[in-house]
């Protein structure tokens, strides 16, 4: 796959059509990233699972409701038997192959889902505030410290988001909903809609 | 008259004058005014007409409990009816108007109702139920429309709301509702303990009654103490403070809705939402919502100029507005004397304080006497008099339920009334907190031993201050040094007797907003309404937009009296959220306009949009129904697309098809249980059409299953069904078959999928450059291969929903658009055209393929559809198998799938038309089936249809009648549902 042309990011088209006069939103919203993503299901507590994750992206298995990251690589806790791995787009198939090899006959599922989701990088000190307008979980500094990851719902969508640093968050949703999610974020993060001054 | 005082007014800024209009007249106010205080400052005492009798009404209260002063506020798209003048902040340019009158507020024809009610027994409790019974049909067509027009409050806005709204989720340990002294003290205590606290206050200002009532706290006047406490709270990082934020409702598990009016007081700020609905999850709610003063029930107590005692002094102290010059205070308690003292100090003449108690010896009555105010105990108002405003009262001696003594008159323009206080227990009660009757203080107060409980069974709310029935500052702040006058107990007083025709209570108003009188309540009791809930509905007491804030307790006390019961025996009606009405916009939040509903788009969506797509919603997806070229209507476009796919080649964006990967050692076993047919025997690289049924045996989804690996299957579902099918799989795996080693993943969005169908399909793929051989021997019908096409990674499924030679090509979604372009380019010499869902449907119908949702409706089995080839007889079980053996599902006369050919072949049978057993004149005919799919087939040049008909499988060749309207029928013949290429030669080349 890596020899093929560069894939088109989910929002490549709609972001080009953005009106130029739109006011600067309260947070940075970057939907243009292209990542390799792998859904990995199995026994999260097993040594072999940890070895496979390490083999794939060089990171440990995160504890419940957390994310571990290093550079572009991430492992996001998604459910008691599922994690989402991040690597570079061209690397995903090879990483899946390494996982399958490492897991051997151990029951698991590793799928390249790099094209299945939109990843939007959110930056600034009001990201938690904006997300709290849609997501029911506690997005405050208290409830969502750095390294937290949640699967939840927002703007009528199933989403997952996590916090990599004080002012850096990432949110994923199904690719087909990318336009709706971006429109929601842009409206909700309009200047003037600050909850806290 | 009412007027603005030369000085005073804690909340107004006299340096900021504000212009507004009332019924077209321009008036002046100040920043910080409410609409009510500004109207009073302009001597606008008459503010509306009552609901039933159109009686003149004035401002009664100064807060959320206001029953009368409901105005239409704003104009054009921002017009809103029924806004309480007492809680609406004034802003420059505000447009306000009164309601419920014609032609004008001053001269109202509807007031004839009141005149009529004087002469005849009309509009009393149950009047409508009793009067408009006959003739029956007239209620719907005559009475109700007329009554609805005449009796409405306000007008609905007619334009689209231009404002934005939003939700905001917040988590805290303690939510304190109410920013008076009790709430502030509770917030302070919790904050000092390190808890995360949210303190909300419904008005724009902190302090509640402490701003007005004059008590000294820790050596400071009330307002200063409040300011200092708020400053201290603001400095704490664990405290969030919010004004203009009303705790509207308490729900299960510590969920509380807080309604924040963000920009009502400064409308139109760009980007700023008008309202924000806080969806708070809290470990504990402190209900510090204060108390509401009760009016006294006497004859003509609804005249403009009759006002709650607390409200009158609020207008003086907070807004520098004197609501009347010549004042009578009428009360059953000490607190009301504060009003007499405050108004006297502001320059009003206090004609008298009338106290129903035999004696008044507390600190406040003494202060009043010392100030030279006439105090008359044992005295009540026999009736108030005046036209559009009170100008005189008649008083007398209250002796039990009679008015005795000399008929004496006192001229006045303001009557301040106080019947005691009712704790605001709404938030406590919303989720089950119980109340107890305090007979001494004459109020229902929270019973702490019967609190609303949370998920752990512990109390999740508690009340503080006046909401808890603790009315005195010293008792609310036990740790503070409070200087306040001592108060003596009140004397419960629910009805002031009158004389002559007023003695019956027909002008003793209890519920001002719904025009319910004491006589109405007593009539209900006489007619057998013993339950307060029934009385409420019969009389409409407490059912108006104010939900009886000033009337419920008075009403149920009157009911208890009439029934000869104690008040706690009668009990209260149910408290339901919201505390005061909240906007529909706040409930909607951001889900309006383009964000109303999430829409799914395929990777090729923009191309479709730019190329004439006429959209159709399919599940959450938008799919092209057809692609219209210049000058084409839908019908012409669809016909062109079908003909082209059959003659040349068409391409379809099939990305919306659900795709679920099922993997694991038990994957085959699992799919054998889910599908009606055998999937475990499917060979790698092969496809099989499968059906899924519910436990009741009814077909609910279908699709092609592909074996992609030794332990891996790809299950296609319907476009709208992928989430449901995936959830279905997970539910069985997690709750029933947890021992199966199977994982599933919904990968619908991972793949863009393009169907290339038609005689030239192979040439298109070969022309695009495919690295796997595609000839019939290499890729057979129902084969699956992986490779590259035009240089992009693809999975090719040779499956067909059109009956043509057809390939469905999946590529990672990021390549969807470029592959679409490549296939269009290579297809151009072969006449390729995209086709939409309607062409897809027509072609599948020509082939007799069923469609979930058309041929199925949740009551149809695969057997009904004749899909025996896909129902395994070998398997010991699958979901629905047992149900399909029940007597009702094996009846021979079940409705079964048939093809239908209309007698007039150029006419398309109406979709859903019912087949009748025999033609009748009347509409009540026995039906034997209905049309499920119906089209004009451009391929065949005539109409075709499918339907479900009783015993249809064995009725081929019969003619049946479809009812198409009164006395109209269409004849059709039952035929084979496969209309086109029954041998399947086209798809097998």
Image (cartoon, coloured by chain):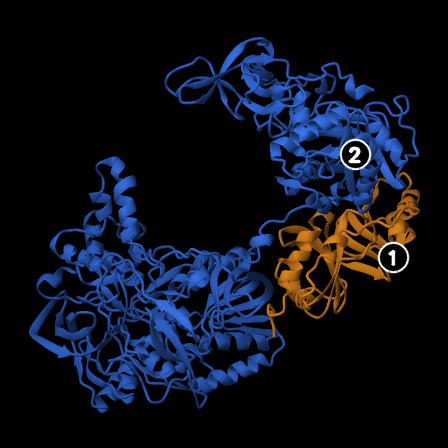
Q: Position of residue A53 (x, y in %)?
A: 87, 51
* Picture mark count: 2
Q: Position of residue A58 (x, y in %)?
A: 90, 56
Q: Chain of mark 2?
A: B
Tell me which residue sits at (68%, 30%) in the image.
B640
- Of the chain colours in the picture, the one used for chain B is blue
Residue A81's label in the rendered image is: none
Tell me which residue sits at (41%, 79%) in the image.
B18
Q: Position of residue B578 (x, y in %)?
A: 44, 59
Query: In screen coordinates, is B971 left or right of B9?
Result: right
Q: Which residue is nearer to you in this view: B877 or B32? A: B32
Q: Mark 2 or mark 1: which is in front? A: 2
Q: Is disc 2 placed on a helix, strand or loop?
A: strand
Could you say which quadrant of the image residue B48 lies in? bottom left
Residue B714's label in the rendered image is: 2
Q: Which residue is nearer to you in this view: B200 or B123? A: B123
Query: In screen coordinates, is B418 left or right of B739?
Result: left
Is residue B738 positioned above or below B269 on the image? above
Mark pair 2, 1: CA separation: 30 Å
Chain coloured orange: A
Q: Which residue is nearer to you in this view: B911 or B324? A: B911
* Quadrant position of the C terminus of chain B in the picture: top right
* Quadrant position of the N terminus of chain B in the picture: bottom left
Q: Which residue is mark 1?
A: A59
Q: Is residue A163 visible to us here?
A: yes
Tell me which residue sits at (61%, 79%) in the image.
B236
Q: Is disc 1 placed on a helix, strand or loop?
A: loop
């Amino acid at each position: 796959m890596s020899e093929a042309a560069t894939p088109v990011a989910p929002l490549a088209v709609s972001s080009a059509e953005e009106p130029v006069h739109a006011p600067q939103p309260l947070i940075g919203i970057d939907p243009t990233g292209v990542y390799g993503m792998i859904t990995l299901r199995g026994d999260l507590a097993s040594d072999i699972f940890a070895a496979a994750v390490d083999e794939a992206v060089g990171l440990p298995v995160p504890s419940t409701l957390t994310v571990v990251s290093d550079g572009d690589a991430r492992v996001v806790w998604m459910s008691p038997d599922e994690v989402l791995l991040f690597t570079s787009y061209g690397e995903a198939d090879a990483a899946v192959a390494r996982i399958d090899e490492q897991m051997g006959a151990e029951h698991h599922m590793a799928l390249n889902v790099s094209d299945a989701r939109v990843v939007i990088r959110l930056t600034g000190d009001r990201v938690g505030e904006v997300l709290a307008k849609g997501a029911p979980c506690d997005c405050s500094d208290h409830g969502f410290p750095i390294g937290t990851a949640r699967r939840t719902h927002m703007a009528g969508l199933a989403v997952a988001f996590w916090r990599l640093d004080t002012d850096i968050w990432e949110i994923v949703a199904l690719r087909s909903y990318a336009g709706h999610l971006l429109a929601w974020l842009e409206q909700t993060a309009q200047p003037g809609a600050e909850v806290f001054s | 008259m009412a007027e603005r005082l030369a000085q005073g007014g804690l909340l107004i800024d006299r340096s900021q004058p504000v212009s507004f209009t009332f019924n077209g007249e321009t008036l002046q106010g100040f920043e910080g005014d409410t609409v009510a205080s500004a109207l009073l400052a302009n001597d606008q005492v008459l503010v509306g007409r009552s609901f039933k009798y159109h009686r003149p009404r004035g401002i009664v209260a100064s807060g959320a409990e206001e029953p009368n002063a409901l105005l239409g506020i704003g104009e054009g798209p921002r017009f809103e009816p029924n806004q309480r003048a007492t809680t609406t902040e004034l802003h420059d340019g505000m447009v306000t108007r009164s309601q419920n009158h014609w032609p004008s507020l001053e001269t109202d024809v509807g007031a004839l109702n009141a005149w009529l009610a004087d002469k005849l027994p009309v509009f009393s409790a149950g009047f409508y139920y009793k009067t408009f019974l006959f003739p029956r049909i007239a209620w719907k067509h005559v009475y109700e429309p007329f009554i609805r027009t005449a009796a409405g409050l306000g007008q609905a806005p007619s334009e689209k709301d231009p404002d934005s709204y939003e939700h905001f989720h917040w988590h805290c340990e303690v939510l304190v509702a109410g920013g008076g002294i009790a709430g502030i003290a509770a917030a302070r205590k919790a904050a000092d303990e390190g808890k995360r606290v949210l303190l909300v206050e419904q008005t724009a200002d902190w302090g509640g009654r402490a701003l007005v009532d004059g008590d000294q706290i820790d050596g400071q006047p009330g307002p200063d103490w409040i300011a200092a406490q708020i400053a201290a709270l603001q400095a704490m990082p664990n405290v969030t403070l919010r004004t203009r934020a009303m705790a509207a409702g308490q729900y299960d598990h510590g969920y509380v809705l807080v309604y924040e009016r963000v920009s009502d007081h400064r409308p139109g700020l760009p980007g700023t939402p008008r309202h924000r609905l806080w969806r708070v999850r809290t470990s504990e709610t402190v209900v510090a919502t204060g108390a509401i003063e009760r009016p006294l029930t006497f004859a003509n107590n609804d005249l403009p100029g009759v006002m709650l005692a607390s409200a009158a002094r609020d207008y003086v102290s907070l807004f520098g507005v004197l609501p009347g010059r010549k004042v009578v205070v009428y009360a059953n308690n000490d607190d009301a004397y504060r009003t007499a003292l405050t108004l006297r100090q502001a320059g009003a003449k206090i004609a008298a304080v009338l106290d129903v108690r035999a004696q008044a010896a507390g600190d406040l009555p003494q202060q009043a006497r010392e100030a030279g105010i006439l105090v008359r105990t044992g005295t009540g108002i026999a009736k108030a008099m005046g036209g559009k405003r009170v100008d005189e009262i008649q008083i007398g001696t209250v002796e039990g339920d009679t008015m005795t003594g000399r008929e004496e008159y006192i001229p006045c323009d303001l009557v301040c009334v106080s019947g005691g206080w009712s704790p605001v227990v709404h938030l406590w009660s919303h989720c089950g907190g119980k109340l107890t009757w305090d007979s001494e203080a004459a109020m229902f107060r929270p019973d702490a031993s019967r609190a609303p409980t949370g998920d752990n069974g512990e109390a999740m709310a508690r009340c503080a201050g006046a909401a808890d029935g603790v009315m005195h500052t010293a008792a609310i702040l036990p740790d503070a040094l409070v200087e306040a006058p001592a108060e003596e107990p009140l004397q419960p007083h629910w009805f002031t007797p009158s004389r002559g025709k007023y003695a019956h209570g027909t002008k003793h108003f209890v519920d001002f907003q719904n025009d319910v009188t004491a006589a109405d309540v007593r009539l209900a009791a006489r007619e057998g309404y013993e339950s307060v809930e029934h009385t409420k509905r019969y009389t409409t007491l407490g059912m108006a937009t104010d939900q009886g804030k000033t009337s419920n307790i008075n009403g149920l006390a009157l009911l208890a009296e009439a029934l000869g019961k104690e008040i706690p025996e009668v009990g209260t009606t149910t408290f339901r959220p919201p505390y005061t009405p909240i906007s529909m916009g706040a409930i909607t939040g951001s889900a309006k306009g383009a964000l109303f509903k999430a829409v799914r788009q395929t990777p090729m969506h923009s191309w479709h949009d730019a190329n004439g797509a006429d959209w159709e919603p399919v599940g959450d997806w938008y799919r092209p129904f057809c692609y219209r070229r210049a000058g084409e209507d839908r019908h012409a476009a669809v016909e062109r697309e079908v003909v082209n796919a059959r003659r040349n080649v068409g391409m379809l964006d099939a990305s919306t098809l659900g795709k679920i990967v099922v993997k694991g050692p038990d994957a085959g076993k699992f799919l054998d249980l889910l599908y009606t047919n055998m999937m475990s025997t499917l060979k790698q690289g092969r496809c099989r059409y499968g059906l899924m049924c519910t436990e009741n045996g009814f077909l609910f989804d279908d699709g092609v299953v592909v074996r992609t690996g030794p332990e891996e299957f790809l299950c296609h579902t319907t476009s709208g069904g992928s989430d449901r099918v995936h959830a279905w799989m997970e539910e069985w795996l997690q709750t029933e078959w947890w021992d199966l080693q199977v994982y599933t993943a919904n990968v619908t969005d991972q793949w863009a999928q393009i169907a290339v169908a038609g005689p030239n399909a192979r040439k298109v793929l070969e022309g695009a450059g495919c690295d796997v051989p595609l000839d019939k021997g290499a890729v057979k019908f129902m084969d699956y291969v992986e490779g590259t096409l035009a240089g992009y990674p693809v999975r090719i499924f040779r499956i067909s929903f059109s009956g043509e030679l057809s390939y469905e090509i999946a590529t990672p979604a990021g390549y969807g658009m470029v592959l679409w372009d490549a296939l269009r380019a290579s297809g151009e010499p072969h006449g390729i055209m995209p086709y939409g869902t309607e062409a897809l449907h027509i072609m599948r119908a020509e082939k007799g393929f069923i469609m979930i949702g058309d041929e199925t409706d949740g009551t149809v089995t695969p057997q009904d559809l004749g899909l025996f080839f896909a129902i395994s007889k070998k398997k010991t079980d699958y979901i629905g198998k047992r149900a399909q053996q029940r007597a009702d599902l094996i009846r021979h006369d079940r409705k079964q799938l048939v093809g239908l050919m209309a007698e007039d072949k150029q006419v398309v049978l109406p979709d859903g038309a019912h087949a009748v057993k025999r033609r009748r004149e009347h509409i009540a005919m026995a039906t034997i089936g209905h049309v499920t799919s119906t089209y004009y087939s451009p391929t065949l040049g005539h109409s075709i249809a499918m339907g479900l008909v009783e015993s249809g499988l064995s009725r081929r060749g019969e003619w049946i009648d479809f009812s198409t309207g009164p006395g109209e029928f269409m004849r059709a013949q039952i035929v084979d549902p496969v209309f086109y290429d029954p041998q399947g030669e086209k798809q097998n080349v």
